[in-house]
Amino acid sequence: MTAQRDYEIFEAGDVTLQSGALFPALKLAYQTYGTLSPAKDNVILYPTSFSAQHFDTEWLIGPEGVLDPTRYFIIIPNLFGNGLSSSPSNTAAPFPEVTYHDAIAVQHRLLTERFGITKLALVYGWSMGGMQAYHWAALRPDMVERAAVVCGSARCAPYNYVFLESVKAALTGDPAFRDGRFVEKPVAGYRAMGRIYAGWAMSHGFYRDELWREAGFASLEDYLVRAWDAAFARRDANDLLAQVGIWQNGDISRCATFGGDLDRALAAIRAHMLLTPGETDRYFDVRDNEDELGKLVNAKSAVLHPIPSLHGHRAGNPVNNPRDQAFLKAEIAELLNR
């Protein structure tokens, strides 16, 4: 970390994790946008997605963006394992197993201890960020007024889990993975992981209609090489594995409060809920949200509005995709008016 960093660190101290392990000197990196109102009632929490750092997701924030910092105080907490918050790359080995429940517990401390925040106008998240939004709504129903789960789910579905197994196999098949960890950059592993992601993240229709041409790629191979082959090489491979583990074990009910009872966990949610999966998302499938919707029996409101897009999972993170971005902007504006 350098003096030029544009984020802050919340020093959580020695934290007992959900597993019972003690994590010494746990750190949560975060960035804020906008101004906290005197009543502290204009807060949006925007957790990060897989491998993302706040730099990667702040594009969505702006006066004309999905989240408006002229009206709201927006906080992006960086998920453990992303290289800024405590991660294998900045922590002495071995790195213990951490969960979404651990992340939400420390994020809650950040909000209450650093800012005195007791209410969240909205928790907004895409993908792993969406899973965190779901965890927030279930674990802190007294605090969350609204939650937007964009291409996310209340738990990692079996099909989603299998996709992540392919990601792990691609990475760890590289000879750089020895004795349970990466000892150098897995160049071939990164490329294999990117090629797997290219197939899963986008849809059949995306490739059929050659929508990659809209982004200026000359050919399919050009798209695969420039968009995916090095997509994850900017991240430490041990960090990636740590976040895969968080993702695979994601389940709002996997805690002492709910004892693995997903229906009970969903029934604990009292927020206004927006479930907005991508119509063509392959691993956060619309059907998972459909099943969850009917179990949000105590939510103030709960709607399911899939994103009508051929951009698969990436419909929920529509950088340089004005149509899907406009859809999300309208949905969030409506949610914030509830």
Image (spheres, rainbow, N blue to C red):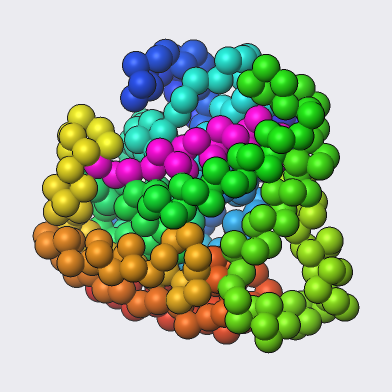
Q: Quadrant of the C terminus?
A: bottom left
Q: Residue at x 46, y 47 (%)?
A: 161
Does residue 74 sit above or below 89 in this rendering? Answer: below
Q: Quadrant of the N terminus?
A: top right
Q: How many marks?
A: 0
The region drawn magenta spans 235-253
**Residue 248 as seen in the image, left or right of residue 204:** left
x and y, in percent, of residue 91 in the image = 62, 19
Q: Nearer the viewer, residue 282 or 72?
A: 282
Q: Residue at x 55, y 71 (%)?
A: 312
x and y, in percent, of residue 119 in the image = 27, 50
Evaluate whether residue 40 shows in this view.
Answer: no
**Residue 219 as seen in the image, left or right of residue 289:** right
Q: Residue at x 47, y 82 (%)?
A: 308
Q: Nearer the viewer, residue 338 or 238?
A: 238
Image quadrant where residue 107 sits: top left
x and y, in percent, of residue 285 in the image = 41, 65
Image quadrant where residue 101 sits: top left
Q: Residue at x 33, y 43 (%)?
A: 251
